Every structure is written in C-alpha cells, then in structure tokens.
Amino acid sequence: MGHTIDVYIISGFLGSGKTTVLKKLVEASRQQGKQVGVILNELGDTNVEQHLFALEKTVELLNGCICCSMQDDLKETLHQFIEHQVDVLFIEGTGVANPNEIVEAIVSPEMIDHYSIQSIISLVDASQYLDYQSVFSSSKEIRTLLKEQITCASLIILNKVDLVADRKMKKVVASIEKQATGVPILNSTFGNVEVEELLKARVQTLDVNSSKCTCGSGDTCSHHHHATLKAVKFTEVPVFSKKEFEKWLKQLPKEVLRGKGIVKFDETDALYSFQYASGHLQIEEISSSQAPIIILIGDRLELTSLKDKYEETFLHKLS
Ligand SMILES: Nc1nc2c(ncn2[C@@H]2O[C@H](COP(=O)(O)OP(=O)(O)OP(=O)(O)O)[C@@H](O)[C@H]2O)c(=O)[nH]1
C-alpha cells in the first residue's frame, strides 16, 4: 500500500470555532513540514473565509452539506487529494454537518487505502450550549444535530469559555460528559489548546455503525435537520457606518444564529471581514478582492421579512 493521507474532521455547530481551530491545525502542520490539504464546506454559495487558507491546497465545496447533498462532490474531491500527494487533510464541515456521514465517505472501499482518519474534533460553543439544548429556545433539529456532533467526536473542544460564568460551565460540562462518555473534553478560548492534543491520533478502527453515534444506527441517516437551517445572502451591500451596522445586527431576530461576510465602512477605504456569532461581532481588516457580501444563517429564517427589513433600513444607501 502507498502513501496514506492523515485526515482530521472538524465538526461543530454554527460559530462554535471550527475555522479558528482549523487555522491552528494548518499552521502547526505546515511548521512540521507537511503538505497540507483543506476542504472547506459552506451551506451558502459563497465562502468569505477563503483568504485565510491562501497558502494551502484548498477546495471549497459550496451550496450544500458534504454530509448529505454533496457526498458525490466530497468523493470527487477526495480523489483529487490523492493525486495532490498531501500528507494531511483537514475537512471542516458546515455548522450543520453530521461528521459520521463524512467518515463514511472516507472509509468507503475506494478511499480506505488512501486515507487514515486520525481524529474527529468537535467544537462546542460553551456560551450557547445550554440554550441550544433547551426545548424552550431551540428546535428539535438543532438539538439532534448537536447530539450527533458530540457523540461522534473523538475529541471535544469546549470553546468560548471566556463568555461563560463558572456555575454555568459546570452544567455545560456535566451535560456533555453525560452524552459523550469517555470522550476527552478540553476547555478553550479561541481554540487555544495544546496543538499536540489536537493532532493526536484518536481514531483507531472506526465502525461507522457503532452504537456510539446516535445517527449511525442504521444505513439511512435522515437529514431533516437541514430542512430548517438556511443561509441567506445579501449581495447589495451599502457602505455602512460601523455603528449602524452593529445596530442592524443587534436587532436581527433570534432565529439568526450566525452572520459573516465582507463589508466596507464609510470611515475608511479598507475591506473588512466580519464574524457575528454567539451574539458577538468581530471585525478584521482584510486584503482581498472579494465583493462585499453579508451571509446570515439560522433556523427557520423568515427570508422575506429579513430581506424587507434590510431594504427598509438600508434602501436609501443602496440606490
Ligand atoms: N469570545 C470568543 N470568541 C471566539 C472564540 N472562538 C472563536 N471565537 C469567534 O467566534 C466567531 C466564529 O468563529 P469561527 O471559528 O469562524 O466559527 P465556525 O465554527 O468556523 O463558524 P461557522 O462558519 O458558522 O461554521 C469568530 O468571530 C471567532 O473569532 C472564543 O473562544 N471566545
């Protein structure tokens, strides 16, 4: 048997910190002299984070989820990476991906000799976890999905602990431990855990039909969770003042769980990438030639009213 490519699957709900951890993994592997491959998957048809992995062999799979509707694209991409001769491949699923389905593609007869799964790293947003688990503030689809991501993991990174008080943290940890017995859990802020822990080989033989994965109990995994989680994009983007942009984000309905994109502000000529997750906004200047865009992702989004409100707020600037 020839060269096998080590694979790491990075899973976790919307905004939990997957890309933040992926950057660390890529950097560490590069420093070890490895040829790195990256597969990025987005629900929408645009990736606003491509500038982050400009040095890597990166394939973006857009407009669907590689765990279901894009399984064929994932397989084709896996074939391509065999030709590319990379040493290590990182696969970041969408925030709504079921990692078990990605595993299945990799352990398929045609791939199994070329790839070796090292770890399924699941990010959990400690600041939102209890809300997402609650029947009062979250949908059944989200609860099921979170459970799948947690129970299929070989390592859980409990991220965003900086946003959580100690008492709440205890509840979060107890709940996760109950769902993922024996799976190591590492607390982190901005994915800051020992990189050796992230890169450790934690998957020996992977039985995708093992009872450990809640979704792998049969050969049909229903993907009803994707039906309610949607991405909406705005491509007509005005030049904002930072204040009005923040104000608009803050008033979005609670169904909007995640926002990201590229915007311009009238204070400067620069282009900015923005990330809106866990109710927090982060803005970073970027050098990119991408056109401004705003992407919102959420559960049962009322697309028409979101669009109307956007136009109502910014119409005077758009024309
Ligand atoms: N306060 C805080 N913010 C964090 C932490 N980790 C990541 N973030 C921020 O949360 C936002 C989302 O992080 P990402 O790494 O893009 O999350 P993701 O899981 O890739 O998000 P999706 O694109 O929705 O799949 C970014 O603004 C990050 O800088 C953390 O530990 N604490």
Image: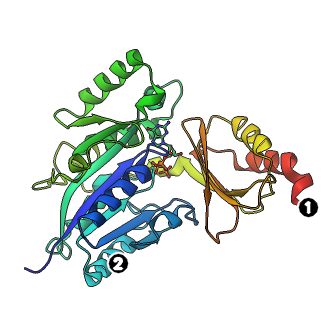
Task: Decide: is 178 above or below 31.
Answer: above
Locate the N terminus by quadrant: bottom left
The disc placed on residue 113 is none
Q: Could you tell me which residue is drawn at 61 percent across and 38 percent down?
A: 255
Task: For residue 10, say whether it is visible.
Answer: yes
In this image, 305 relative to 15: left or right? right
Query: Residue 120: x percent and y percent?
Result: 26, 51
Which residue does the image show at 20% across and 74% down from the upper left? 111
Residue holding disc 2: 76
Considering the numbered disc 1 on the image, is that residue within a helix, a strand or a loop?
loop
Nearest to the observer: residue 274 or residue 210: 274
- Of the 4 image quadrants, the one containing the C terminus is bottom right
> Please, which colouring scheme is shown?
rainbow
Type of the residue with mark 2: Glu
Residue occupying image coordinates x 87% and y 59%: 318
Residue under label 1? 319
Please tell me whether residue 196 is drawn above or below residue 8 in the rendered image: above
Instruction: Say whether residue 220 is visible.
Output: no
Q: Could you say where residue 159 lies in the image, as x and y percent from the top left?
A: 39, 37
Toward the left, the furthest residue is 1
Apparent side of residue 100 relative to residue 278 in the rendered image (left or right): left
- Above or below 188: residue 68: below
| Residue 286 x %, y % | 61, 61
Could you say which is closer to the camera, residue 189 or residue 69? 189
